[in-house]
Amino acid sequence: MSRFVLEWWWFLALWPVPWMLRRALPPRESQAQAVLVPTAWLGASAALRWRWSTVLGWVLWSVFILALARPQSLGAVEDLSRSGRDLVLAVDVSGSMQQQDFVMSNRRVTRLHAVKSVVSDFLRRRYGDRVGLILFGEQAFVQAPLTFDRETVAHFLRESAVGLAGQTTSLGDAIGLAIKRFVQDPEESSTKVLLLLTDGRNTSGQVAPRQAAQMAQRLGLRIYTIGVGGTSGLFSFGGSDLDEQMLRELADISGGRYFRADNTQELMEIYAVIDQLEPALVEQNPRRRRHDLYFWPLLWVLCGLPLWAWSQRRD
């Protein structure tokens, strides 16, 4: 929505200058002062009478001050640029993601909690990308469609919960759903990326993971697979369920890359590497297109000056 602004609004302070000069200078003797036309100007007291030439002079002076203030029309906020990259996050929310083998701020947290924190920070850096979110377990569903509103996607991720999509893991269905969303999307993107994060192996679903990866490869969709979950140490729970060979194959088939994170620091480093492999734009402040309007009041002044000069001679 466009709006009206005055770029040099401080010129409005010049408006009372003629009145101040009239008060400071001695009155001019003129026989024409006897001829007055009663006119109420801008709601002023009815007792105050102005000559119509004086009213015209004040109107022209006011319009001239408006022109000096440089009126402008501001258009809608423009998105200066976009990367042409569509990025879908597929996050495992199966039962095993509640294992507390990650540490943040010197306390144990669940795998999903660590993922939420790291991925939310990752999303804030993805300026210029359209981002979507898929949550999967036994089933896969779209939590957020592709959008430039990264904060909303991060909000939906923070609101996700373990077991929301079932207790088992369906990698193939998650990839297949991402493919379906890309195919149905009306906007064609130059780069399609899927970040698939899981802590388990494919144990359910209707689509075979390798078959889904081959379909992604034909679509031009790169898959970066991320395996999470500790495999050793005091807080290791269920890490052996991770099918690293499968995740590596899915990434290789689609032209992506496989990563492994055993702790929060490694998870942060992985998303930093993905930022380098799939660089986002440098964020810029949004702007509005400006249209100068000063020439319209200036044109009114130029057209009214001859009439005002003529009225002065008649006085």
Image (tube, helix red, strand yellow):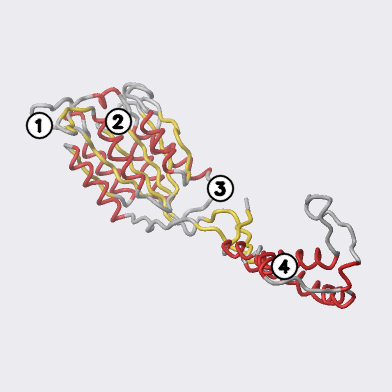
Please tell me which of labels 1 and 3 falls first in the chain. Answer: 3
Residue drawn at x 75%, y 70% is 27
Q: Which residue is mark 4?
A: 61
Residue designated by label 3: 186
State the residue position of label 1: 232
> Who is closer to the viewer here, 162 or 128?
128
Are the two marked residues, 1 and 3, in contact with CB atoms closer than 8 angstroms? Answer: no
Image height of 248 relative to 105, above or below: below
Q: Viewer-nearest of labels 3 and 4?
A: 4
Rendering coords of residue 284 (x, y %): 42, 58
Amino acid bearing label 3: Pro
Q: Left or right: 274 with respect to 1?
A: left
Amino acid at circle 1? Ser
Q: Nearer the viewer, mark 4 or mark 2?
A: 4
Q: CA distance from mark 3 to mark 2?
A: 31 Å
Name which residue lies at 24% across and 32% down: 199
Of 24 and 290, which appears nearest the observer? 24
Q: Cα distance, mark 3 to mark 4?
A: 54 Å
Q: Is residue 293 visible?
A: no
**Which label lies toward us, 3 or 2?**
3
Callouts 1 and 4 close, C-beta under 8 Å: no
Comes first in the chain, label 3 or label 2: 3
Of circles 1 and 2, the one toward us is 1
Kind of residue indicated by mark 4: Trp
Comparing 221 with 51, the one in front is 51
Query: The residue tagged with tag 3: helix, strand or loop?
Result: loop
- Where does residue 171 sit, x and y in percent of width and height? 34, 34
Check disc 2 and report the residue beneath it: 202
**CA gap, disc 1 and disc 2:** 22 Å
User: Circle 2 — which element?
Assistant: loop
Query: How far apart are the alpha carbons under marks 4 and 2?
Result: 78 Å
Up/down of 233 relative to 51, above or below: above
